[in-house]
């Protein structure tokens, strides 16, 4: 495996986790949004990841680590939550219906914070892996001096 493959894999993880953190931030920012351009309350979103093989089959066959299939991360979808919104009684709210009920997003801020911490840790792990590969490549170049 080359240093570049490991950097590509770490880079894909960084991009995927950055996208995840952006979506989680949007969810937390819109936890009280009762009106969207699409109509109705904001719908929670979540990122769907997929593992994509790195390289091509011929390279994998010639690679001395044959049998170890390397994969990088891809964001394949932004899933929108289909659960019903929370209904709160607040007659003074501008979006309240005739019974004083307001539809709000079904977002648990604490769950979003836990997911944000997990995404941050995964981002940090990918950064560490990227830096390690970079240091190994630098040391390999220094050997040739």
Image (tube, helix red, strand yellow):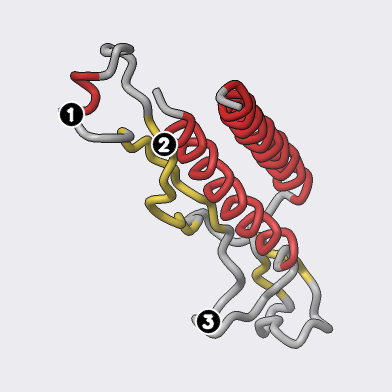
Q: Residues within 10 Å of mark 3 (few under 14, many from 20)?
A: few
Mark-to-mark CA distance, 3 and 1? 47 Å
x, y percent for residue 23: 61, 58
How much space separates mark 3 and mark 2, taking CA atoms? 37 Å
The residue under the point 53% across, 44% down is 11
Q: Earlier in the sequence, mark 3 or mark 2?
A: 3
- Judge by depth and name the residue closer to the eye, 129 or 17: 129
Nearest-to-viewer mark from 1 and 2: 1
Q: Which residue is under mark 1? A: 57
Residue 94 figure quarter: bottom right
Residue marked by disc 3: 39
Find out whether the residues at labels 3 and 1 contact each other: C-beta distance under 8 Å: no
Return the residue nearer the eye: 18 or 40: 18
Q: Residue at x 33, y 34 (%)?
A: 54
Label 1, secondary structure: give it. helix
Expressed as whole percent of the image width and height from the top left, the position of residue 38 reads: 49, 81
Q: Is residue 30 above or below residue 135?
A: below
For the C terminus, the image quarter is: top right
Q: Secondary structure at mark 3?
A: loop
Query: Between marks 1 and 2, how big is the CA–CA gap?
Result: 15 Å
Residue 72 disc label: 2
- Residue 68, placed above or below residue 56: above
Specify the quadrant that holds the N terminus.
top left
CB atoms of marks 1 and 2 within 8 Å = no
Dot 2: element: strand
Q: Nearer the viewer, mark 3 or mark 2?
A: 2
């Amino acid at each position: 495996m080359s240093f570049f493959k490991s950097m590509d894999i770490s880079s894909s993880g960084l991009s995927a986790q950055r996208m995840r953190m952006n979506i989680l931030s949007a969810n937390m920012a819109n936890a009280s949004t009762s009106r969207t351009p699409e109509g109705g309350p904001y719908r929670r979103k979540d990122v769907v990841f997929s593992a994509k093989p790195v390289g091509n089959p011929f390279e994998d066959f010639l690679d001395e680590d044959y049998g170890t299939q390397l994969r990088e991360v891809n964001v394949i979808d932004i899933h929108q939550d289909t659960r019903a919104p929370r209904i709160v009684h607040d007659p003074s709210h501008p979006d309240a219906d005739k019974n004083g009920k307001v539809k709000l997003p079904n977002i648990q801020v604490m769950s979003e914070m836990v997911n944000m911490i997990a995404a941050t840790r995964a981002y940090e792990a990918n950064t560490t892996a990227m830096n390690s590969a970079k240091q190994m490549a630098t040391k390999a170049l220094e050997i040739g001096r």
